[in-house]
Amino acid sequence: MEDLEIIELYFKRDEKAISETAVKYGAFCHSVALNILSLDEDARECVNEAYLRAWNSIPPQKPDKLGAWLGRVVRNIAYDLWKRNRRQKRCAGFEELMVELEDCVPSPVTVEHEIEEQELTEAINTWLAALAKNDRVLFVRRYWNGEPVNALAKEAGISPANMAKRMYRLRQSLKSTLEKEGYSL
């Protein structure tokens, strides 16, 4: 079923919207959550919460790309659960991603930095747009979807060490770009 048809089911308040969403995007949403949390039970909980949020948000929202919208929703839910679990020392799945990115992306922690966050987002989006499509896709899959280096390497037909080097070069490129934009890292 196409996204527009699924969204129309949400607008009609037809419960079939949830099952169609699960059929089309369930595996994707589960993998995003699992890559962050590392626990299948927690990942399933996040996906179910994402379906509930979709039901409660559509309408009035009408996402242009349902898959991307759901991916963002489930990622945010998983990240919030990861933070709670981290406080309880239960989960380390997302820790590796944060450690890899911490030396090239500043982390503003106060509300006063909202404008700077928007500028940072724009700088990162500009950097991503300038990358070759393969590199852009790899970067997003690794650092947004949280896919493991080993899985990306296997799919690309290269060794995990080579994929790790490629990801390192991408992070260094991002770091260099942000430093040129005036961000101190």
Image (tube, rainbow, N blue to C red):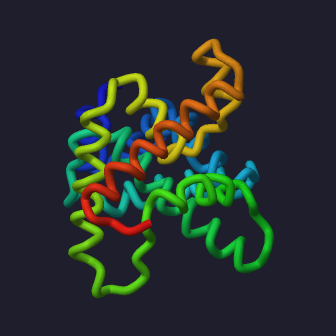
In the image, what residue occupies the spot 48% across and 45% down? Answer: 171
In the image, what residue occupies the spot 74% across and 54% down? Answer: 41
How far across and down, in percent of the image, does residue 176 sit? 38, 50
In the image, what residue occupies the spot 22% across and 56% down? Answer: 61
Locate residue 17: give its quadrant. Answer: top left
Give the total number of marks visible in the rendering.
Answer: 0
Q: Relative to 133, is 122 above or below?
A: below
How far across and down, in percent of the image, does residue 123 sit? 25, 54
In the picture, the quarter occupied by the N terminus is top left
Locate residue 159: give its quadrant. Answer: top right
How far across and down, in percent of the image, does residue 98 sit? 59, 59
Name the one closer to the observer, 122 or 79.
Answer: 122
In the picture, the quarter occupied by the C terminus is bottom left
Q: Relative to 13, is 157 above or below?
A: above
Horizontal placement of 143 versus 33: left or right?
left
How far across and down, in percent of the image, does residue 95 sit? 67, 60
Horizontal placement of 8 versus 140: left or right?
left
Q: Relative to 2, is 54 above or below?
A: below
Name the one closer to the observer, 146 or 109.
Answer: 109
Q: Relative to 160, is 174 above or below?
A: below
Query: Looking at the image, which residue sits at the far right?
Result: 90
Query: Looking at the image, which residue sits at the far top?
Result: 157
In the image, what residue occupies the spot 39% across and 47% down? Answer: 174
